[in-house]
Structures are given as structure tokens and as C-alpha cells.
Image: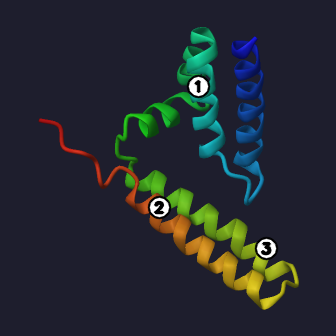
Amino acid sequence: MKKKIFAAFGILCVICGSIGIVMPLVPTTPFLLLAAYLFARSSPKMHKFLLENKVFGKYLSNYLNNKPIPVRQKLISIFFVWLSIGSTIYLVTLPLWVVCFLLFLILALSIHIATLGFFRKKRN
């Protein structure tokens, strides 16, 4: 029963992560990482499918193995973060505190993306 619940939540996380690819402010990575965790504990077949998927596979494998992301991919990701959140700030009338929070979020996400894979643990 526990495995079926984990698998169902894993599928839900993949759906949410897929939505996050095209919707601003919906996270992709946390949902996909949670799905990988849930599938690893419920269904090796679904876990393998997720890690070998042509859309998510390389992205997830690199993230899980703490491999560096190519600079070009980082720049594209940062560009789309700024574009999506920046357009929200520009197009929607928001209270000042929300604008400040979104600007902080843009900065934090940019720093996170820029430093992915940079602080890898050295292996002996």
C-alpha cells in the first residue's frame, strides 16, 4: 500500500514539475527531485524511466550527481527567471512588499543557478 501511495505522489510531482517548465513561479526541480525520491522507494521501473526520460533525464541525473551545468544553460535559465518574474512585476500592479519579495526571489534564484555544481565535494 505504501509503495502505491509513493508512486501516486511521484506521478503527481512529475505533473507539477512539468507544469513548472512553462508556468512562472512554479518550481520544477523540487517536484522532480521529490518524484525521483518517491519512485526510488516505490517503483524501480518508474525511477529508471524518470532518470532516462528524454525531457527530464539528463537534467535530473546531472543535478542528483552534482555535475556542473554548462554556462550556456545557466545563462538561459537565469534569463528566463528574470523574464518571467520581471514581466510579472512590470505587467501586474503589485504592492511594494510583493515587488521587493519578487526581486529578492529573482536574486536568490540567480545566485542558486549560477553556483549549481560549483561547490562540489572533492572525492578522494
Q: Quadrant of the C terminus?
A: top left
Which residue is at the front of the view, 95 or 58?
Answer: 95
Tell me which residue sits at (64%, 30%) in the image. Answer: 35
111 left or right, relative to 91: left
Is label 2 in a helix, a strand or a loop?
A: helix
Q: Which residue is mark 1?
A: 54
- Residue 94, given in percent of the width and then of the height, sits at 84, 84
Residue at the extreme right of the image, as rendered: 93
Q: Is residue 20 above or below residue 25?
A: above
Instruction: Answer with the quarter of the image where residue 44 lies.
Output: top right
Q: Nearer the viewer, mark 1 or mark 2?
A: 2
Residue position marked by numbered label 2 in the rendering: 112
Within the image, what quadrant is residue 95 found in? Answer: bottom right
Is the residue marked by circle 2 packed among few (<14), some (14-19), or many (20+) residues within 10 Å? Answer: few
The residue to which callout 3 is attached is 88
Question: Is tag 2's residue or tag 3's residue first in the polypeptide sequence?
Answer: 3
The residue lying toward the viewer, choosing from 63 and 71, is 63
Q: CA distance from mark 2 to mark 3?
A: 21 Å
Identified at 67% across, 51% down, the residue is: 27
Task: Tell me the kind of residue under disc 3.
Answer: Thr
Q: Quick check: marks 1 and 2 in contact, CB under 8 Å?
A: no
**Image depth: mark 2 or mark 3 in front:** 2
Q: Residue at x 61, y 31 (%)?
A: 55
Q: How crowded is the residue under tag 3: few (<14 C-alpha within 10 Å), some, or many (20+)? A: some
Tell me the residue at 55%/65% (across/down).
109
Left or right: residue 25 versus residue 59 is: right
Q: Secondary structure at mark 1?
A: loop
Identify the amino acid type marked 1. Lys
